[in-house]
Image (cartoon, rainbow, N blue to C red):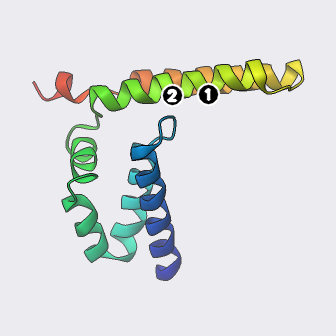
Amino acid sequence: MRWIYTALGVLFVALGGIGVVLPGIPTTPFLLLASYFLIRSSPPLYRRLVRSKTFGPILEGWNRHRAIGRRVKWVAIVGAGAAVCLSIAFGGLPWAARAGIAAAGAYGLYFVWRIPVLDDVSR
């Protein structure tokens, strides 16, 4: 099981890395999943992850305050909102599928909207 957790942790770090450079792909959720799996399977890899210049601050903010940065939050909201709107407008899907995408997107956006911002929490 340890190898599976390590592989999943590395996979989620890679997906988080992709999310850093591609708009619309979230970084924080993938890093949280990566830290979950790595802390249980490979403490040295977990320590390396939280010490990294790119990913460390995101994880530290979440671990200490259960919050994300303002920029991260707005990129997630704008990217997800755009993806939902484009899927509905140009996906060529039946109306029931479009309604499902709209409902799932609205829930996801509501969830992200409710996550505290680091600036507000750390005061």
- Per the image, label 1 sits on a secondary structure element best described as helix
Q: Which mark is residue 83?
A: 1
Q: Is residue 123 left or right of residue 74?
A: left
The image quadrant that residue 46 belongs to is bottom left
State the image coordinates of residue 27 (x, y, percent, origin top left).
42, 45
Residue that sits furthest to the right in the current view: 94
Q: Is residue 102 left or right of residue 4?
A: right
Give the total of numbered labels. Answer: 2
State the image coordinates of residue 64 (x, y, percent, origin top left).
20, 43
Q: Residue at x 22, y 59 (%)?
A: 52
Between the C-alphas of marks 1 and 2, the distance is 6 Å
> Is 110 located above or below residue 49 in the figure?
above
The answer to whether the residues at label 1 and label 2 have Cβ atoms under 8 Å apart is yes
Q: Is residue 33 left or right of residue 70?
A: right
Instruction: Looking at the picture, tell me which residue is in the foreground, 19 or 42.
Output: 19
Residue 32 visible from this viewpoint: yes
State the image coordinates of residue 49 (x, y, percent, origin top left).
28, 63
- Amino acid under disc 2: Gly
Q: Which mark is residue 79?
A: 2
> Is 4 located above or below residue 52 in the figure?
below
Q: Residue at x 78, y 19 (%)?
A: 99
Residue 103 visible from this viewpoint: no
- Amino acid under disc 1: Ala
